[in-house]
Amino acid sequence: MKRLLLLSLFIPLVSFGQDQSVDNNYYDKNISTIYWEVNGVKRNAIVYIPEKDLLKNAPLIFVWHGHGGSAEKFIKRFPIYKFWREAVVVFPQGVNSKSPWDIKAERTGWQYQIGDYEDRDVKFFDIMYTYFLDSFSIDDERIYCVGSSNGGAFTYMLLQLRPKIFAAAAPAITANVGLKSIYQMNLPSIPIFHTSGKKEFSFSKQKKLVDYIINEKEAKYLGYWNNNILTKHYKSDKGDLIWFTHNDGHRWRTKDTQMIFDFFKEIKP
């Protein structure tokens, strides 16, 4: 029922004249590039598809790279499919997008705010989401969203615009939620794992964001999560919050992939 309601919601938003084609030129035979046409623009994602014997009620994970990044680079930085071989993992590729640090849109990424570019990246997500649910045996109670920097901001946007889809989310190194003020944000009641680098320029803003989420969730501090002294675990009936603060700057650390996997795996449908 959940799936049918969501698909009917998306039909007016997107032109479904997508041209799906697949390019298998990767070191792992389960990894391919899939192409779609979204409102006349060809878009693509690098996708890990499990072996057929594992592909039953599979989790679905969307992973969004940062501004100036690429799906090809980020699949190497965040190889969660190596830990979760039964999950379908999607690494979408961004297109040139404006940001306060790239006003000429010379680098790839995602819309900086809700409504930018007529929400073209949200429409891209809608098409991919529908495609994977139609094409594979996906467990719609185990759909997750991960993003780094600009991709982390886009993760927060999707949580607000598509609140009934995700079981949990892991936005990283971002203080942007797609709105002029974080106090306008309305998040669904799901667990969130937010990553911050203590040396990055936006750390104080991220702390304000995390504090706001804690307050909105009416969450209570429990201590460390999974015995990791770099984490703070806040318990809430509206979905727990884990705040992981590493000692580096504005970067996604490949070695932290295991933590995101552990976080998603502990979420019970």
Image (cartoon, helix red, strand yellow):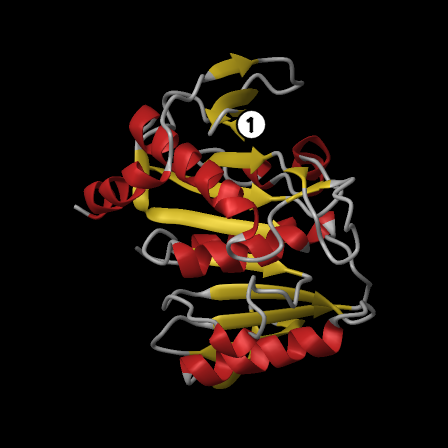
Does 191 sit above or below residue 85? below
Q: Residue 263 appears at what percent x and percent y?
A: 50, 58
| Residue drawn at 55 percent across, 51 percent down | 146
Does residue 53 show up?
A: yes
What is the tally of numbered marks visible in this picture? 1
Q: Quadrant of residue 139?
A: top left
Closer-to-camera residue (118/262): 118
Q: Residue drawn 56% across and 29% down?
A: 45
Residue 153, position as x, y percentages in the image: 60, 58
Q: Position of residue 187 (x, y in %)?
A: 42, 68
Question: In this picture, is 162 found above or below 183?
Answer: above
Quarter assignment of residue 173: bottom right
Does residue 109 sit above or below 197 in this rendering? above
**Residue at image point 66% right, 73% down:** 206
| Quarter of the image where the C terminus is located | bottom left
Q: Nearer the viewer, residue 150 or 243?
A: 150
Instruction: Tell whether 238 sits left or right of 32.
Output: left
Q: Tell me the kind of residue under disc 1.
A: Arg
- Secondary structure, mark 1, is strand
Say left or right for 209 vs 9: right
Return the residue at label 1.
43
Q: Is residue 259 visible?
A: no
